[in-house]
Amino acid sequence: MRKTKKALALLLSASMMVSMAACGSKEKDTQGNAGDPNVEGTKTPDAANEPAYPGLKKLSGEVKNDYENYIVPDETVTLNVYSQLANYSGELQGWFATILKNKFNVVINIIPDGEGVYDSLMQEGDLGDIVIWGSNGSKYKKAIEAGLLYDWEKGSLLQTYGPYINEHMQLALEANRGLTDAGKIYGFGHNVASDPSSYESFMYTWDIRWDLYDQLGRPAVKNLDDYFDLLVKMKEICPTDENGKETYAVSLWPDWDGNLVMYVKSMVTAYYGYDELGIGNYDSDTGTYYDCLADGSPYLEMLAFFNKLYQNNLLDPNSMTQKYDQMMEKMKAGGVFFSIFDYAGADAYNTDEHLAENKLMTALIPDDARPLVYGMNTAGGNRVWTIGAKTQYPDLCMAIINYLSTPEGRLTPDYGPRGLCWDYNENNKTYFTEFGLTCHNDKQNTMMPAEWGGGNFNDGGNQMNNTTWSENDVNPETGERYLCDLWLSMQVEPRNETERAWREWAGTSLRDDYAATKNFKVAPATTMSESDQSDDLKIVWNQVTKCIVQYSWKAIYAKDNAEFDQIVAEMKKMTADYGYDQCLEWSLNEASIRNELEKPLRK
């Protein structure tokens, strides 16, 4: 086994340099070959031979089409995982790290994306061992052109060490092949589906404190004005949270802002069903594109809605500066009444303690809203699993991704270690153990046993932050979906009287079934990937989008309508000076491409 290491210089922010040891990176050999998997003569795994690297061994002798036949290094290996989706930096800790250590004898070192990180890694010529992309667009394609991603078909790597993927994800693999002119498979996209006829679970569930809504007599909520009036009344009857701090209707966070302010553009998606695209929103029903800064645009409408909440002391004043985790702590303490997202609403608030107090967050969708739900995609999404070309352990990387693509590997990152937190019963259906249900209901406060790494369940999870199968796909081992809300074992009696009242009102026990009764929209799944931008456009794009985000936050915090209008006018002028029209032209072209792909799929 090679013991040499190669240092990766990583620029994690404009002011801080962090060096990571790339234990899986390959040094040049005596012939000057840099370990490029596309160069003939480079060692690669072969199904008929022993693994390419002598430190690795097979568990079962002859390689079979069985995902349990993974490989284990004799000595612990550190793998660098560059993930553009991660919100975590450094060595993975906790129960998920323990699982990977036990199964593969690996330590995972996560390198999150940040300002300058991608450029530094590209310049170094080494992206790490496992590489997870937030998009299959220009950065991903640039890495392929530079020869920095591993060809999964080279030396039968996929067939030998990714047998479950190879057998069950052929459409997703072929979709990846078609992303570039190279004609090679470098990975697959997230949320793969085996059945294209359905759609994902609803993310835009409009969760609200139903116990407070019940106290107020359940007033009709037709539109945003009605929702605003309801939130005003909620604060009147619940002015402080469990810690004695002031409550707010909504609490935002800037961590996930991109081309636009995330929560604002998502409010457009939740209310009108228009998806984010470029510097605006796109309607999959018609192919219409809505420029975010056009007069009367949906984006500006929702920006004004959040400013209205702020002016009426209903928006958390720390929204612009806090982190996502800080917002979640407020939600769990009852300091927030409303979230358009399931994961930041009911999923966070409905702890055993709150349920015991007859409190509940659950869905209340305005009558006029048309929340968007995403179609299932057998080709996978745009967040791609890949392997770095310079890794010393392509077989080990493939085996890990293959495990995460199996039913057990798909369930485990969401719900914890099998046996400890969940398992299959005598009828081959999925169920939570008592401890596992506690973990699921209160991830932040449930502590894991020491033998599983200790710490709380949430912090010990899969911080690589990507999925393989869609949670709404069917687990072939049970016939149930991976999503626990839909397990037969979870269809239980109401957990308190408030939930019983909601079920009677909604006519169902599930938020998804309730949302499906509303006038929702479906965005068809396609193979679209983001088009390249010229170097000049990238400069303009960064200036324009940075300005939009900064001035959008300023507008949210405007003290009155006049100041709001003034800030929006300044934003329009500044972005126009930067070259807004160039960004709009690119976005309109993207909308045209998407429209052509979706036309055959519209019902």
Image (cartoon, rainbow, N blue to C red):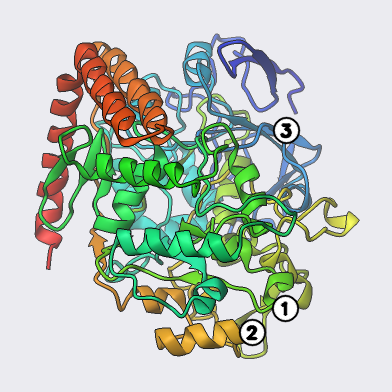
Q: Please tell me how many numbered marks the rendered image carries.
A: 3
At which x and y percent is residue 602?
13, 63
> Can I make out residue 48 in this image?
no
Checking the image for residue 496, the label placed there is 2
Checking the image for residue 356, the label placed there is 1
Image quadrant assignment for residue 439: bottom right
Do tag 2 and tag 1 residues touch (Cβ < 8 Å)?
yes
Q: Extreme right residue here? A: 450
Using the image, determine if residue 218 lies above or below residue 7. Answer: below
In 3D space, how far apart are the residues under numbered discs 1 and 3 (Cα atoms)? 44 Å
**Amino acid type shown at disc 1:** Ala
In 3D space, how far apart are the residues under numbered discs 2 and 1 (Cα atoms)? 7 Å
Q: Secondary structure at mark 1?
A: helix
At which x and y percent is residue 455?
82, 50
Image quadrant assignment for residue 238: bottom right
**Amino acid type shown at disc 3:** Thr
Q: Is residue 32 left or right of residue 598?
A: right
Which is more foreground, mark 1 or mark 3? 1
From the image, which quarter does the C terminus lie in? Answer: bottom left
Image quadrant assignment for residue 83: top right
From the image, which quarter does the N terminus lie in? Answer: top right
Checking the image for residue 336, the label placed there is none
Most foreground residue, 221 or 141: 221
Disc on the earlier residue, 1 or 3: 3
> Can I make out residue 220 in this image?
yes
